Image: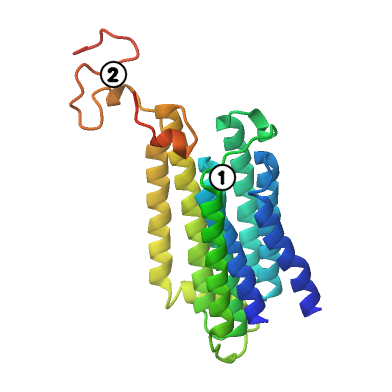
Amino acid sequence: MTNVVFWILAPLAAASGFMVFVFNSMARATIALLVSFLASGGLLIWLGLAYLGTVVILMMIMEMVIMAVFMIAYMMNPAGLTQMSMYHNKRGSLAIGTATFVLLAAGIFAAPWPHRAGRAPRDPTFQLGTALMGPQMLTMIVLGVTLFATMVAAVVLATHRGRYDRFGDDLKRRPPADPVRGGVDG
Amino acid sequence: MLQLFLLLAAALFAIGLYGALSQQSIVMIMMGLELMLNGVTVAAGAFWHYLAPASVAGQVILVVVVVAMAVEMAMGFAVTTAIFRARDVDMTDMAADLKR
């Protein structure tokens, strides 16, 4: 059973991950990425990390939905269904990607991995929750502050500049960038 | 079995790196970065299960990576929005051109 689950989900995760950059339609690429994440999340659940595997799956479903909205909003072909090719330095990238894989694979098989130490707790989610609310509290606080800073920065970046930004970021732009000329100091 | 999981993680990381380096579209580059982080989640889960299940460190690393994924996605979309607003482009090669 162990091997069957792995040999179904692992090739699916890798193959669909690769197909993301083979498909010449953004919509298909998004679905391929989602399949890759679903397979990886399934592997995490199978490893005993039911909570984190479910979090990865749910988060990725939501991210792909948001990505689809962005695709429709920004891509030159609505819905991303028209065929297109948007590569640069394809050969160099392929060489770097392949070299990275070979290097990592060599390290994986050359490293003397230690034996398994200890036994898995009966409830790994409880183990994680207890740690995050106890000894790993600092990690949790840092992650929380990081997410908050990200929210603020993302909103500031994405918000349309209004009339209070007419003098530029350093307030030195003369004349001010008014949509209609003739305003104060214009 | 640990080696097989790590091999899968390496494959996901390498595929993501190839995508992040070869794609022009900012959204597609983000997909590459996501795949790289996906490889790290698989590796962290495998390390926890096969090496130190009694320690919570593997799970905590996984939480950190999941947060990194969320941050990367949010900032990526924000940068795409900002550059699209300012320059009307969503491709890195076009964004690298000097503004007239």
Q: Quadrant of the N terminus of chain A?
A: bottom right
Element class at badge 2: loop
Please tell me the numbered disc located at residue A146.
Answer: none
Which residue in the protein does label 2 denote?
Answer: A177
Q: Please tell me if label 1 and label 2 are on a single chain.
A: no
Residue B66 location (% of width, % of height): 53, 61
Q: On what subunit does the disc labeled 1 rest?
A: B
**Residue under the image location 34 percent in, 30 percent down:** B98
Residue A32 location (% of width, % of height): 69, 50
Tally of marks: 2
Q: What residue type is labelled 2?
A: Ala
Element class at badge 1: helix
The CA distance from mark 1 to mark 2 is 33 Å
Residue B11 location (% of width, % of height): 61, 65
Crowdedness near tag 2: few (<14), some (14–19) or many (≥20) residues, C-alpha within 10 Å: some
- Please determine whether, in this image, residue A3 is positioned above or below residue A179: below
Q: Foreground residue, A41 or A147? A: A41
Crowdedness near tag 1: few (<14), some (14–19) or many (≥20) residues, C-alpha within 10 Å: many
Left or right, residue B57 beside residue A139: right
Left or right, residue A162 beside residue A174: right
Which residue in the protein does label 1 denote?
Answer: B28
Task: Evaluate whether residue A125 shows in this view.
Answer: no
